[in-house]
Amino acid sequence: MNELIEYIAKSIVSHPEEVTVTQEDKDGKTILKLHVSSDDKGKIIGRHGRIADSIRVLLRVAATKKNDRAFLDIP
């Protein structure tokens, strides 16, 4: 799932070399943290959070196929 989020983020941002995804496992849930350049935060979040919501939907689908629960955090 890290690769999926990283691929999507790198295709959206202007500085793909600064994209990193870290993973934490807590209470049977997977939390992915997406770090991007401060210049690219707006591109990842999108208008009214639409792009971030779309990425979260894709992550949820990928996690469901693996019988897992995954959440995306963009700090």
Image (cartoon, rainbow, N blue to C red):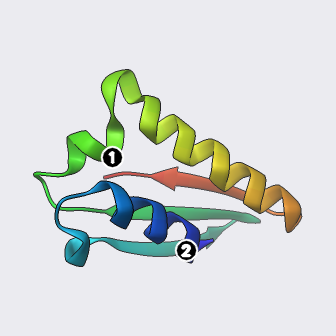
Type of residue at label 2?
A: Asn
Q: Is residue 2 above or below residue 58?
A: below
Alpha-carbon neighbours of circle 1 within 10 Å: few (<14), some, or many (≥20)?
Answer: many
Q: Quadrant of the N terminus?
A: bottom right
Which residue appears farthest toward the front when viewing the image?
A: 11
- Residue 23 appears at what percent x and percent y? 52, 74
Which residue appears farthest toward the top when viewing the image?
A: 48
Q: Secondary structure at mark 2?
A: helix
Viewer-closest of 55 and 72: 55
Which quadrant holds residue 67?
Answer: bottom right
The structure residue drawn at horizontal position 57% and vertical position 62%, both measured from the top left corner, is 31
Question: What residue sits right under mark 2 in the picture?
Answer: 2
The structure residue drawn at horizontal position 22% and vertical position 78%, both measured from the top left corner, is 17
The structure residue drawn at horizontal position 55% and vertical position 74%, both measured from the top left corner, is 2
- Please give left or right for residue 49 compared with residue 57 in the image: left
The structure residue drawn at horizontal position 37% and vertical position 62%, both measured from the top left corner, is 11
Which quadrant holds residue 24?
Answer: bottom right
- Work out how far the residue at label 2 is from the one at label 1, CA to CA, in angstroms: 16 Å
- Residue 38 appears at what percent x and percent y? 12, 54
Residues tagged 2 and 1 counted as in contact (Cβ below 8 A): no
Alpha-carbon neighbours of circle 2 within 10 Å: few (<14), some, or many (≥20)?
Answer: some
Viewer-closest of 16 and 60: 16
Type of residue at label 1?
A: Ile
Label located before the other in sequence (2 or 1): 2
Question: What residue sits right under mark 1 in the picture?
Answer: 44
- Residue 27 appears at what percent x and percent y? 72, 64
- Please give left or right for residue 3 compared with residue 69 in the image: left
Residue 11: assigned label: none
